[in-house]
Every structure is written in C-alpha cells, then in structure tokens.
Image (spheres, rainbow, N blue to C red):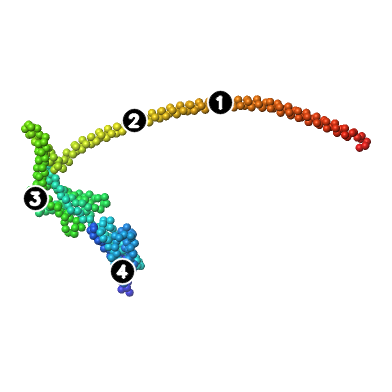
Amino acid sequence: MWWRVVSLLSWLPVQAAFLTNHVDTITVEEGQTLTLNCSTSPSQPSTLQWLAPSGFTIYFNDHPALRNSKYQLLHHSANQLSISVPNVTLQDEGVYKCLHYRSPVRTKEVKVIVLAIPSKPTLEASVLRGQNREGVVLQCSTARSKPPPQITWQVGNGVEFYGDTHHEFEMDGKTCNTTSKLLVHTYSKNSTVDCIIRHKGLQGTNLVASFRFKDWVADQEATSDALEKSSLSSQGTQLPTSTGAVMENSSTSEIDKEEKEKTTLNPDLTTEANPQYIGLVRRKSGILLLTLVSFLIFILLVIVQLFIMKLRKAHVIWKKENEISEHTVESYRSRSNNEETSSQEKNDQASHPKRCMNYITQLYSEAKAKRKGSVQGSKLKEKHPHIPEDIV
C-alpha cells in the first residue's frame, strides 16, 4: 500500500515536467542553413505541426501551409517531422514551435539566434598636435555585427588592452557598427600595432588588422614631397624675375604647406579651433536668416498693400454700379406709375358712356314692358265681361 502511494507521488512531477513546454536554443550564422527536427516516441505516433515565429503554420505533417519556397521538408513520418531553412537571415530569428497532437497536446519550442559576423576591420591613422598632447591616433572600425564585437589593441607582442570603443546600431536595431580609437604618444619606425576583433560567430578565430609605422612614415614623406613639388611647380609659373620675390614666395609656400599638413594630419587640433570657426559660421548664418526673414516680410507687406488697393477699387466700382441700378429702378418705377394712372383714366373715360347707354336701354326696356302689360289687361277685360254676383 505504501509502495503504491510513493510511486504515484513520484510519477506526478515527472508527468507534469513532460507536459510543460520543452525549449531548445540553436545558434546559427547568417547565410547558413537552419535544421529543425521534431520527433516523438515510436510507440505513440501523432500528428506533428511546425509553427513560424510569426505564429503561421509552416508544415502540417507533410503538407506545406505557407506558400514560401524558403522552408523545405527534409523528412516526415508518423513520429518525426524535420524541416530546413537555407540561407538564414536576421529576419528568421525567433522562437519556432512544434506541436504534438495527442491528449493532451504537447509543445516543443526552439529558440533560434542568428549571428551576423563583423566585416573585415579597417585601420586609419591621423596625427594629433595640440598644446597638451601629441601623437598618432589609430582608429579601427568594423561594420554590421550582431552582437557587438570585442575590440582590443596589441602593440608589438605585448599585452592586449582596450581602447575607446563606441557602438552605433543601425536602423533595424539588431546590427551595429563598432569603432575603437587608440592614442600612441611615442613610437619607432619599426613598431607595429594590431587591432584584434573577437566575435561569437567567428568560432574561436579572430579578425586582425595590423598597422606599421614604417609604412605610414614613408607614405607621409611621399605625400609631403608631392606637395612640395606641386607648390614649386605652381611657383615656377607665377614667380617674377626678382630673386627677393622668389624668397618671399618660397617662404609663404612653406607656411601654406605646413598649414595644409596641420589641417590634414591633425583632426583633433582642428577640433580645438573649431568653436571659433563654428561661432563665425553661426553668426553669418544668423545674419543671413535675418535678412531673408526681413525680405520675406517686406514682400508680404507689398502683397497685402496691393490686395487692399484692389479691394478699394472693387468697392468703388460696386458703389457706382449700385447707384446706377437704384436710379434706373426709380425711373422705371415712376414711368410704370405714370403709365398705370394714364391707363386708369382712359378706362374710366371709356366706361362712363357705356354706363349711360346701359342705363338708357334699361329704362327703355322697363317702359316697353309696362306698355305691353297694360295692353294685355285691356284685352282681357274686353273678352270677359263682368258677371253679376247673383249668377255666381
């Protein structure tokens, strides 16, 4: 009895753990092929289904649900469903789900992480000449990395150390561009500096970019010689015949050349002098803005004045037209009244003799009717003589 109770208590947590979601993690590099496998025990076959991170069905058993050739079926059986995603991109990252349709339904989750390998690093050098610090600034940069890489510096075969590293993410929010700066105060022509980049997608290997001061110094000397030759050639075409003028031009060309070298090789020095230049530029831009705004306001005032003048002219014309129309209406009304009165008088004059004639004809007809009545009475009296009352 006790043994059965203990076995039941031990079986409940195992069954609960089996029913919970099983989560796996797969890390794949961008451009590689992702393989997703879902299987059950051979004794309990069931219907299998793969879901994309967006929630849409990829395959239901061996039937593709999405009309997308990106997903391919590798194997299907009663207890296994395997698919592949070739040429993986960052958009394929997410959680894929495999559903086992049994009682109850079980779920297997696979978290896919896509790595973007950083690009080959590039090294740039610039001379720093300021009041407090001088030296060479080295900048190592790499682009489109996920997650952000680790950049270290190594001078010669010494110890590695970190520089001033800055990460800038792109619009997608996943990949980033990384730069690291190193300031070298003293160096020899035979010394070298290595920029070392480490990343998860490199699988233990590193990306290295080397900088040799010997080659850089040779390039600087070659550029300075080219500048000298170009300045001398320009002076040979523009110099006068006097030797004093030649000396003055050569000294000014050397000064200009030094200024050019400072501006091209000293970015930090130019940044120190930038505030005054920026202030002048801002003042000039402010003056230009004020002049533009005042000019626009003047144009608007002119347009408003012209519009007001046109309105006044239109108002005067409208008044004149109203006065003319009122005058014509009054004259028309007076004419119509005169015509009505004259027509009434004519009608009265024409109707007066008619009334008289009607009255005369009426009197004549009445007299005629009376005469007829008297004649008929006399005739009746003659035909019927008087009968005495005794006979009656």
- Residue underneath mark 2: 302
Residue type at mark 3: give it: Ser
Determine which quarter of the picture holds residue 62: bottom left
Numbered tag placed on residue 77 in the rendering: 4
* Sequence-first tag of 2 and 3: 3
The mark that comes first in sequence, 1 or 3, is 3
CB of mark 4 within 8 Å of CB of mark 2?
no
Pair 1/3: label in front: 1
Q: Position of residue 281 (x, y in %)?
A: 21, 36
**What residue sits 29% from the left and 63% below the top?**
72
In the foreground, 341 or 236: 236
Q: Where residue 191 is drawn, which disc sits there?
A: 3
Kindly tell me whether residue 227 is visible in this rendering.
Answer: yes
Q: Which residue is mark 1?
A: 335
How far separated are the C-alphas under marks 2 and 1? 50 Å
Distance, label 2 to label 3, CA atoms, is: 72 Å
Q: How many residues crowd around disc 4 within 10 Å: few (fewer than 14), some, or many (20 or more)?
A: some
User: Of the residues tagged 4 and 1, which is closer to the observer?
Assistant: 1
Exactly how many numbered labels are in the figure? 4
Neighbor class of circle 3 (other Cα within 10 Å; few <14, some 14-19, many 20+) is: few
Q: Is residue 392 above or below residue 187?
A: above
Disc 1 element: helix
Helix, strand or loop at mark 3: loop
Q: Outermost residue, bottom direction? A: 1
Residue at (11%, 34%) from the top-left corner? 238
Residue 64 position by quadrant:
bottom left
Q: Nearer the viewer, residue 350 or 104?
A: 350
The amino acid beneath tag 2 is Val
